[in-house]
Image (tube, rainbow, N blue to C red):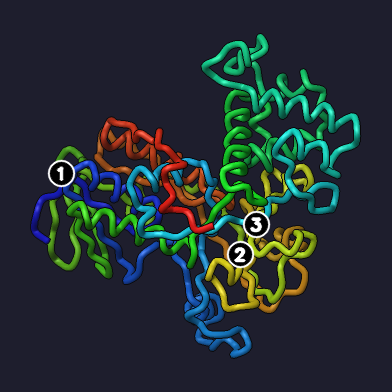
Amino acid sequence: MDEEYDVIVLGTGLKECILSGLLSVDGLKVLHMDRNDYYGGDSTSLNLNQLWKRFRGEEKPPAHLGASRDYNVDMVPKFMMANGTLVRTLIHTDVTKYLSFKAVDGSYVFSKGKIHKVPATDMEALKSPLMGLFEKRRARNFFVYVQNFNEADPVTHQGLDLTRITTRELISKHGLSDDTVDFIGHALALHRDDRYLNEPALDTVKRMKLYAESLARFQGGSPYIYPLYGLGELPQAFARLSAVYGGTYMLNKPECKVEFDMEGKACGVTSEGETAKCKKVVCDPSYLPNKVRKIGKVARAIAIMSHPIPNTNDSHSVQIILPQKQLGRKSDMYVFCCSYTHNVAPKGKFIAFVSAEAETDNPQSELRPGIDLLGQVDELFFDMYDRYEPVNEPSLDNCFVSTSYDATTHFETTVTDVLSMYTAITGKTVDLSVDLNAASAAEEY
């Protein structure tokens, strides 16, 4: 281990593994270490025995739940936008050859006490029970505007500068009701709270276009895809990529201690009495607790069930977004469900998650609106974890710390953090202008 590296990466969470892969492909000499004896860090997948040990102590799971090895329960469950940044990153790095994906069946939104399919196009808006007749026409006109919008073609802007007018102003020009704005902002544009209404409209329009493009890509019931066998496959795929390009991996390395020189810059990592020298350190917040601050908590419920979520058209995989306003909260709640069709549970079993940014210290009652949508559950577990973000200045200490995973059940915010870290580390941006249609290796739909 007594060598010098360009970058030492600590922790094998998804963010760290993507960065390790990208940096190795760039030709940097990378050492990747983890105190755990498994990949994934906080974003690992657990089999049934591991799940039971984590949440129920030493109890053995009941036999009727099936074989432990048939379960892959994600600790940070998230779907991928089929046309989104993570998929582009997978294709850019050719990691798709290590993975198989399947489309997600359904995308729903909670409105006025009921679950509704999310309308994403002008034609779907006309059919949606979310809106009355006149509102449908207004929504259709708005969707047509968004679908036709091309940032490079001013004719499609209809005289509006979306970098200057707010989302609230754009929506008011189309006369949409608050309930319509709610599902557009939260279930289509995937904003986590209502701050976006006072921000430039361009971001929301781009997000809506991404949703519609992702939906159209596979002609499925949702814009999302998800790996077979769960998200635990992703960190390992990027680890393989890093190894192919010369990256070195060391798991089960206890007490990885970052060493600093006289100027306070990271210069190496010590574990078990050996020090590896480096120019930069990349890590999750747990490795440098004095360089992060707590920014909140995530509350999560994990349910094992023997049926799909009711009122989702028997979808075997589905996302339901519960907008903050519908629940009287400050941020959204998310329901995520997948099943044996994605090889994450035995035949006939479904895994559902309810997640939210915690606003109380009682996840059981706080998550109740989402849990109530699940119907009968076989087993229910509750989890709560703190979220952290870096407060250091990487240009001064050469430490690049990721932000903790949020409560959303999609990956767009996660990859944004990864790509901004990559730019901070290398001074370059990743070229993600890939031909998605040429990426047939990723498709097992």
Q: Earlier in the sequence, mark 2 or mark 3?
A: 3
CA neighbours of label 3 inside 10 A, class few (<14), some (14 to 19), many (20+):
many
The residue furthest top is 159
Q: Earlier in the sequence, mark 1 or mark 2?
A: 1
The residue lying toward the viewer, choosing from 148 and 274, is 148
**Residue 219 in view (yes/no):** yes
* Residue that badge 2 annotates: 338
* Residue that badge 3 annotates: 105
Q: Is residue 209 above or below residue 312?
A: above
CA neighbours of label 1 inside 10 A, class few (<14), some (14 to 19), many (20+):
few
Q: Nearer the viewer, mark 1 or mark 2?
A: 2
Give x and y (percent) for residue 305.
68, 74
Identify the element where label 2 is drawn.
Answer: strand
Identify the element where label 3 is drawn.
Answer: loop
CA neighbours of label 2 inside 10 A, class few (<14), some (14 to 19), many (20+):
many
Q: Nearer the viewer, mark 1 or mark 3?
A: 3
Q: Is residue 226 above or below residue 161?
A: below
With 296 as the anchor, is 420 left or right in this view?
left
The span from disc 2 to disc 3 (Cα, nearest Å) is 9 Å
With 50 as the anchor, is 253 left or right in this view?
left
**Residue 191 in view (yes/no):** no
Q: Amino acid at mark 3?
A: Asp
Q: Earlier in the sequence, mark 1 or mark 3?
A: 3
Identify the element where label 1 is drawn.
Answer: loop
The part of the image, by quadrant, that contains residue 435 is top left
The span from disc 1 to disc 2 (Cα, nearest Å) is 48 Å
Q: Is there CB contact under 8 Å for labels 2 and 3?
A: no
- Residue at left 57%, top 17%? 163
- Looking at the rendered structure, the number of numbered marks drawn on it comes to 3
* Residue that badge 1 annotates: 261
